[in-house]
Amino acid sequence: MKYRIESIDFFVRETKPARFPSALGKQGRGATAQRVTSPLCHVRMMLRDASGKVSFGCAADRLSVRWLDKRPGRSQTLKLRELTALIRQARECYLAQPAFDSPFAQWLARHREVVAAGRAARQEDLTSTFASALLERALLDGVSRLDGKPLCEMVRDDRLGIEAEQVHPELKGVNWSEVLPARPLREISVRHTVGLYDPLSEEDWPASRRLNDGLPETLADCISFYGLRHFKLKISGDAQKDLRRLARIWDLLPQQRQPIITLDANEAFDALEQFAQFVKRLEKEQLGLFQHILFIEQPLPRRLSLAPRAERWIRQISRAKPVIIDESDGALTACRQALALGYAGTSHKNCKGVFKSLMNRALLLRRAEAGKETVHSAEDLQNLPVAPLQQDLAVVGMLGITHCERNGHHYNFGLSMLSEQDKASVARRHTDLYEQRGGEWFLKIRHGVMQCGSLQCPGLGVFDEPDWASMPSMAQWSKQRGILPG
């Protein structure tokens, strides 16, 4: 026995309602605008190594049930109840087998158990993966702390026991020091998301509606304030409306900086033919914008995306622009399935799993070496400080992805949800990533770029232990929200 899990506890930090309303995909068609709150589920895992040394491992993520489960007729409360139940089930899986030698083997066995439990409870694989990945990150953080190394070094030095062939037979013998960059990135560009409800200019957001909270409010404001060059544009599946809005956005983008654009449909197109027609119209009617698009993300509902009949259309559309999956990436083998159908790749998100992204990275590298186009993007709309944001950026830097979707700082007011202890930790450890303005701490973005060197510390991106006492336990929070009895 090299490691042993001693305990696992959950805490939840609530946030204030978002500065602006948001919607996902075709939910934006006539849906009620919502200024959502972002409950952040935190994990504290205590681990012991063979020498008796003890360390914590932490992780956190938004309980993002609007994205995880889009099945109709299911209330937010129901989905939160089911997700938190699955997170607790994941805890029981880990505590039932607490001793392990290989972090990878421990994760893979527990992941399979969590997915099986989720399927038995009729949950989406994406939801099960979320629950599994939350504990996976705490495990990786704790093991890396015990070894006194950043996670990137643990992977490159083969200290995690990764046997990728257990998932992808073609990855047998993969050399992780060749898959990953020699050093993790120390700066990452922000790809600013333009949501379906986000105001674009003064025309949408007159003085009477201004928040006047010191932060940029319209897209035009954000471009000027942050020096943005990378943009992720949300589309709703309503072709006419989307084309009009995209034309307005293109007029606002900084043409002299050669903007880089991605499109995200969030499963908005119900038919393959409908999506293909939209891509043709977009190229014909808005060639300037179209030429700056890197890829299109998840146009089809997850029930259609990986169906065999999607192949002809995906290959046809991919001749114009690469297409990747996101919400369809629930199973461990989803990326491999997608590549076989003609997709160019998938997204990294910590909430889909770190080991999974590492293996996907290796798959895509082999495809690129064979001369085929590949995309491994970094996405996640509302990753918030400290643990969710920093751990995600640490993995993005380890994977060598140069820009990522990052917009929590637009929808939320800096680090206002954190305790003074957590803010003091930021002030001591991570002033490359954050700055103080007017008495509050904010993500520091200069010329569209974040500096992330301080995240390569022992563990996974978080130097100090979170202020657990400032958060209610998940059980207490669930009672307060009426999610769970007792």
Image (cartoon, rainbow, N blue to C red):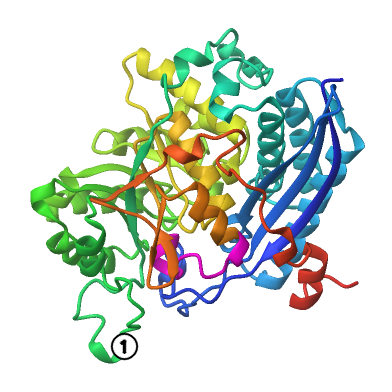
Residue at image mark 1: 209
Q: Is residue 318 magenta?
A: no
**Is residue 347 something that shows in the picture?**
no
Q: Is residue 447 left or right of residue 122?
A: left
Residue 379 image offset from top left, x and y in percent: 44, 47
Which amino acid, by three-letter code, is at mark 1? Arg
Among the 4 quarters of the image, the one containing residue 55: top right
> Which residue is found at the position 65% from the left and 19% from the top?
162
Residue 242 image offset from top left, x and y in percent: 28, 64
Residue 297 image offset from top left, x and y in percent: 39, 46
Depth check, front residue: 187 or 380: 187
381 vs 34: above or below = above
Q: Quadrant of the N terminus?
A: top right
456 vs 206: above or below = above
Q: Is residue 413 magenta?
A: yes
Depth check, front residue: 249 or 92: 92
Q: Residue furthest top?
A: 173
32 vs 339: above or below = below
Q: Is residue 326 left or right of residue 367?
A: right
**Is residue 139 something that shows in the picture?**
yes
- Segment tinted magenta in the rendering: 408-421
Q: Is residue 378 left or right of residue 14?
A: left
